[in-house]
Amino acid sequence: MSLLPVPLNVRAEHQAVLELPTDKPRATLPVPNPTQSFWLRDPGVQPAPAHGSTGELTSEADVCIIGSGITGVSAAYHLAKAVARAGEQGTSLSVVVLEARDFCSGATGRNGGHLTAHAYSDFRALKARYGTDEALRAIEIERYTVNEVYRILTEENKVEHVDFVPGGRVVLFFTAQEHQEARLDYEAAVAAGVDMQGVEWFTKEEVQKRYGASYPAVLIPGNNLWPLKLVSVLYNLAQNASDRFSLSLHTHTPVTVVSPLRTTSARRWQLATPRGPVACSYVLHATNGYAAHLLPWLHGPNGIVPTRGQVMATRASETFALGRTGFVGNQGFEYWFPRPNHTVSTTGDKGQLVILGGGREATRGRGYEFHTVDDATINSEINTVLRRFLPAVFPDKFKVSTEPEMEWTGIMGYTKTKDPFVGPLIDPSDPGSEVQYQGQYISAGYTGHGMPRGFACAEAVAGMIYADVSGKTWTEPKWLPLHYLTHQNVTKDNVL
Ligand SMILES: Cc1cc2nc3c(=O)[nH]c(=O)nc-3n(C[C@H](O)[C@H](O)[C@H](O)COP(=O)(O)OP(=O)(O)OC[C@H]3O[C@@H](n4cnc5c(N)ncnc54)[C@H](O)[C@@H]3O)c2cc1C
């Protein structure tokens, strides 16, 4: 029996539970009093957490973006860049971002901090379901995102500002089954021509020597960073991109309903908020786990299932150096990385601070935290296994008795294919919905893996909006998996 405090090899069961019909209510708005995450505590960046929460509300804009996470802010960034590229001859654009709580206080502000492109994960399943080209695109979009984010941070001299650490990711295999599945996916990806530069396989003895844990593993290229700081960099770049682009942000302004404007106004849509209405021509739902609140057909297993994740900041023993590498274990259920420059606590405790997330599989039999939007509380069962997890993986290097310095929860958006919905709004039960919702778009449902996808999906959807605004035809980028698109992939049911 395993000494690890979590059940192993439960991915298939987890998937089956995700796909069950639910009698749980539809997602609510984000709860008003969330737990505080490491990333949101005193980040010292602009915009301020409550930016635009008081004073006059912007009454209209060309584009309303609902949600200020990596998706919403990246969309604003890409729209701004499109306007700047078009220059004097191009279309000018006004954009407003509406956020229910503090700036970037959803999943992006509460996640595990990994920005890592999958090297081969699920390659065989993707190839079987969609074909080789789509499986390759699923890898390409993540590499594209990571490269673009790094390019922007480098050009803006912000690599250190966001604590970008290209330390790699070590995937630990706790079971022979997991190890074998990974090898088969890797070999299938290699056979399809995927470049595996930087990927190295290690025996458990090599892992013990290098990293202090006694499991076989693979090292893939990977990064960690401070997600809110990245989003703030993108926001400020958008704001300063062009005189022909205006960007405003209203936090603490939840959108409660989106309805058509039946007036003579040139604007198509009205967004109701407790602070008054906002009229706009285009709407982007960048609400991820909360998407079904405004879009009821996304409730349930064919849509986007709000799923609560839990993370803690804990400290290794003084003598143990994890270096700069990120890790995942147990089929990705657990993920952790050591923070750079955090080797002494405010109370003088020495040792590297580690951000560790996961533990949902400990709720096996009790729903895996699916169908919850409550990030105001933590799950004590998960707290118990997370505390025991690193001491079990790295014996003697962590103590079960160590109090986590912070612990928080956040809401992910799961889909049953693990892929997001990207494109025009389409309600599969309503054949006329694409026309009915004309001008409304979505990019949401990253299934806990949004950092290497949200930026690029936002680029795709911003490209669609900008093409429509300027009377052009949108052409899909070569890195975009076409199976992400709402109009290719009307319901996640159709593709299974
Ligand atoms: C605990 C946890 C750990 C994770 N770890 C990782 C990781 O290490 N690496 C990784 O790649 N991914 C990770 N993820 C997933 C990743 O964080 C998400 O996929 C990604 O941040 C989604 O970004 P987003 O902008 O689409 O959504 P969000 O960041 O959730 O943004 C949506 C925003 O919309 C707002 N909103 C919702 N409804 C409304 C409304 N009606 N009106 C106004 N505003 C509204 C919300 O308040 C929120 O701020 C993790 C997620 C969680 C929760």
Image (spheres, helix red, strand yellow):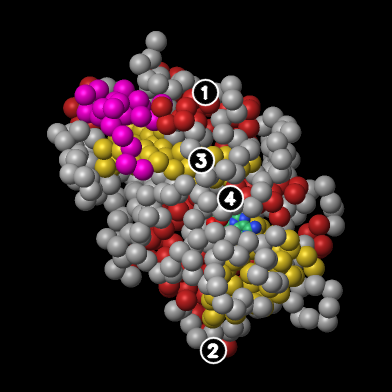
Residue 354 appearing in the image: yes
- For the residues labelled 4 and 3, the Cα–Cα distance comes to 10 Å
Dot 1: few (<14), some (14–19), or many (≥20) neighbours within 10 Å? some
List the residue tagged with mark 1: 10
Residue placed farthest to the top in the image? 1
Above or below, comparing residue 115 to residue 78 in the picture? above
List the residue tagged with mark 4: 31
Q: Earlier in the sequence, mark 1 or mark 4?
A: 1
The residue that appears at 52% across and 45% down in the rendered structure is 376
List the residue tagged with mark 3: 377
Q: Earlier in the sequence, mark 4 or mark 2?
A: 4
Dot 3: few (<14), some (14–19), or many (≥20) neighbours within 10 Å? some
- For the residues labelled 1 and 2, the Cα–Cα distance comes to 56 Å
> Residue 88's mark?
2
Type of amino acid under label 4: Val
Residue 405 inside the magenta-drawn segment: yes
Q: Earlier in the sequence, mark 1 or mark 3?
A: 1
Residue 393 appearing in the image: no
Tell me the SS state at disc 1: loop
Above or below, comparing residue 296 to residue 385 in the picture? below
The residue that appears at 22% across and 28% down in the rendered structure is 397
Q: Mark 3 and mark 4 in contact (Cβ < 8 Å)?
A: no
Dot 2: few (<14), some (14–19), or many (≥20) neighbours within 10 Å? few
- For the residues labelled 1 and 4, the Cα–Cα distance comes to 30 Å
